[in-house]
Image (cartoon, rainbow, N blue to C red):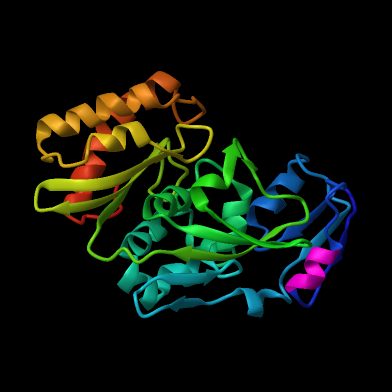
Amino acid sequence: MTPFDVAMPASLSEAIDLLDPDDPTIRPMAGGTALMLMMKAGVFRPRLLISLAKAAPQMSGIRADPSGNLSIGAMTTLSALERSDQVAAHAPVITRAMPRLSNVRVRNVATVGGALAHADPHMDLPPVLIALGASIRLVGPLGERTMPVEELFTGYFETVLQRNELISELHVPAQGQRNAAYLKVTTGSVDDWPALGVAVVLDAVGPEAKSGRIVVSAATEKATRLKATENLLAGASLDAKLLARLGDAAVEEVEMVGDVRGSAPYKRELLRVYVGRAVKAALSNNGACN
């Protein structure tokens, strides 16, 4: 790696002051799990890293309001998210998905905000958060703004984040009585990067859906809601015929991207099958599985 400097601001505001929107060689660092790999590979050569370690206390923690809506600090580690009783009580689909998100060594260091800002389309957490309707709070020199997680990603490893903005907090609506599941397909171990991820959140009464959200990842340039496919759920009986229709609609709606984990045609057929399986898993509350 080429030489670089490290700054350790004591607060979020100090960190923002150090960021330069015109200098791409200055980068904030949370857990650093992905950033260090990029630096070792020579993909990114920073001049200055701004470590958020000292600011972590004011940007960490998980709180639930009386309705079960969650506020999660951006520097909260993935392991803390996995072990949280409040997350398990109010958004259990997240708890079920976390053990399959990378390995425990990474989860002990990687942070919620860092994972979202990195925008790797193979990440397991973004599709689950989008399906739940989660939002984030961004902080920059001009103040704060809030947006749905769905609107954060613009493409392959790309977001709407400005170079002088940081994610400060994640907000997750209570799952409540909604049924939810996340299924991932891997070609290796269960915690490997997926060839396909599908998250589903359903508002259903018995076998009949009132509405739902379906999100696909890993096989696309970014985690993507299948809004046209979701429209088939409204008022529909969730029988085998509908599940097959959902799969067909999904492959028509989104463009697949091939990689080392599978070609685009292969992932298209995976999606055709796994959308229905994810809806079925949500109905039975099986949660995350392979």
**Residue 263 visible in the current orientation:** yes
* Residue at 34% across, 65% down: 91
Residue 199 sits above or below residue 270 on the image: below
Residue 81 sits above or below residue 268 on the image: below
* Residue at 32% across, 29% down: 250
**Image quarter of residue 266:** top left
Magenta stretch, main secondary structure class: helix
**Residue 106 visible in the current orientation:** no
Give residue 31's position: percent from left, percent from top: 65, 63
Give residue 34's position: percent from left, percent from top: 64, 51
Q: Magenta residues?
A: 12-17
214 vs 34, nearest the viewer = 214
38 vs 201, nearest the viewer = 201
Residue 269 sits above or below residue 287 on the image: above
* Residue at 51% across, 27% down: 259
Q: Would residue 114 appear left or right of 175 to someone viewing this image? A: right
198 vs 4, nearest the viewer = 198
* Residue at 59% across, 38% down: 154
Magenta span contains residue 14: yes
Give residue 161's position: percent from left, percent from top: 68, 50
Q: Would residue 80 appear left or right of 158 to someone viewing this image? A: left
The quadrant in which the C terminus is found is top left
Check the image and name the residue furthest to the top. Answer: 265
Magenta span contains residue 214: no
Give residue 212's position: percent from left, percent from top: 28, 46
**Image quarter of residue 18:** bottom right
